[in-house]
Amino acid sequence: MDRFVFLTFDGLSRGAVYAAFALALVLIWRATRIVNFAQGAMAVATAYVGYSVSAATGSYWLGFAVAVLGGLLLGAVTERVVMRLVDHSSHLNGVVVALGLVLVIQGVLGMIYGNEFRPAEAPFSREAFTVGGIALLSRFDLFVFGAVFLVVALLVVLFTRTSVGLRMRASAFAPDVSRLLGVNVGGMLTLGWALAAAVGSLAGMLVLPTELGLHPNAMDIVFVSSFTAAVVGGLDSAVGAVAGGLIVGLLLSYVSGYLGATVAPIAVLLLLVVVLLGRPGGLFSRSAARAV
Amino acid sequence: MTALLEAEQLTVGYGAAPVLHSVDLTVAQGSITAVLGANGAGKTTLLRTLSGLLRPATGRVVLDGQDLRGVKVEQMVRRGVAHVPEGRGVVTELTVDENLRLGGLWRRDRVDAKRALDEVYDLFEPLARRRRFPGHQLSGGERQMLALGRALVGRPRLLLLDEPSLGLAPKVTAQIMGLLRTLRDRTGLTVLLVEQNVRSALSVADTGIVMSLGRVVANADAATLRDDEDMRHAYLGF
Ligand SMILES: Nc1ncnc2c1ncn2[C@@H]1O[C@H](COP(=O)(O)OP(=O)(O)OP(=O)(O)O)[C@@H](O)[C@H]1O
Ligand SMILES: [Mg+2]
């Protein structure tokens, strides 16, 4: 029982990060119908920069801010300089370019920083509080929950309560109509990529201290888990991405806790396959929402 | 009569072969012009070119004396051009209210944007009762009201309407035609009205053009077109 409680909290904490990362994937999917396979590599790149700044200045938080803002910038540049030039007649083109971007980013990171793991320190203690002898949550876990909650809340407010959010949603659903109504669709696309990449970078900063540390490939497994979370949630649904993230986090935690860490990646892939076969629209899909 | 819109020698296509061939068109300020012709004649293509969604290979569009070459689509609404596209103008994932607000987001004058939105709700009762409905839950007629209302929130000078009567009951069609008249008389709105429903279009229009295979084959008073039997038989099918 103690173990179950511990694994549950651990799973929710990991799941919160997957949720944020899945949310970033969903943001881009909704706007462009592209799965941004480069999101993990982009997040690692900004984390490297962030930790370099932390090391140089001695301030973790300055580096943290640089990583997230760097994500914003990298996302915008990726859309403007790379994705905008892609021929959008087939969605496969965007995917292929994103995969190419992964190789480029990981190669460049390897050249600059080397291919060894570097420590990624956490801003708070990772020692779990114990309540009645059961280890529950660390300060860092609380920070993760708080940060993810804040980001989700801000995105909800942005998309449902502001005119920029309305423009972004309209651009994603009906680009031509939006342009006829004076919406700068290209600008909304850039903003969407920027926000998504910033959320991805934030997720990276939250997950790297709990893994082996900084490495060009450090986010690969996180990407697979988060992609599964997004698919479980239906790829189109922000609520689904958050729920999917928590589900995948719990699954990973229980499987590694009870069956061993080596089984965990297989469990994630199994979940992906089951969902794709059983409910390809995701667990949260509303059927026929887009009737014309 | 002063011309609000002039198209000169427009040649437009989607690929190599042009769909419109050297189309000339003059639309008088404050007039309603019907654009008629069989399926595939190029009516939608003409509207898409006038609103900037398609770039002509040759020729140009002039609005109120200003050449529109190089003007981006998203700038057109700021110049007073509203295009209600064929069939699917409503963003079905957004609510009625969000769709309408979208029509006025570009406007600096927030007070008047709000006033225009309220006017649209007054004009279209069914929309006022369904503010929070997502677009995909509206009937065809309600969608058409929404698309039209959303254009009006921007207080356009020139309204490009692509088959507003498609799928509507005759009574609703008559209401929309009547509304266009009223708007023209009250606000000096200029309308370019693409219609399959030739009778109702000519009942409200001042002038009409007939298109066939990407060319303008007739350009005359609405009354003249109504009475020209040869023309009706040859191009309009009644
Ligand atoms: N996206 C497109 N790509 C290629 N050809 C197109 C495209 N849209 C229209 N066409 C062609 O252009 C021609 C004119 O089409 P258009 O839609 O302008 O006709 P229309 O007069 O609006 O017809 P309808 O009354 O059926 O709406 C047609 O032959 C059509 O096949
Ligand atoms: Mg048409």
Image (spheres, grey):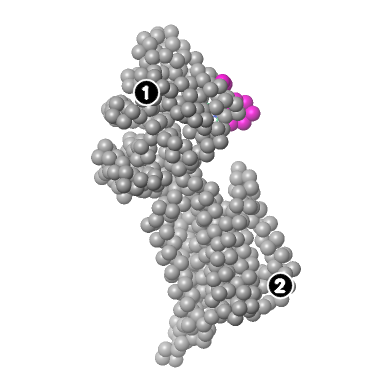
Q: Is residue A5 magenta?
A: no
Under circle 2, the secondary element is helix
Query: In whole angstroms, how far apart are the C-alphas of marks 1 and 2?
Result: 69 Å
Q: Residue at x 39, y 25 (%)?
A: B29
Q: Chain of mark 2?
A: A
Do labels 1 and 2 touch, CB within 8 Å?
no
Q: Residue at x 51, y 20 (%)?
A: B24
Magenta-tinted stretch: B12-22
Q: Residues within 10 Å of mark 2 (few under 14, many from 20)?
A: some
In the figure, is residue A156 to the left or right of B13? left
Tag 2: residue type? Tyr
Q: Is residue B13 magenta?
A: yes
Under circle 1, the secondary element is loop
Q: Which SS type dominates the magenta stretch?
A: strand
The numbered dot on residue B31 is: 1
Q: Residues within 10 Å of mark 1 (few under 14, many from 20)?
A: many
In the figure, is residue B179 to the left or right of A83? left
Q: Residue at x 64, y 78 (%)?
A: A56
Report x, y in % for residue B198.
38, 20
User: Is A15 above or below relative to A76?
Assistant: below
Q: Nearer the viewer, residue A83 or A94?
A: A83
**Residue wearing tag 2:** A113
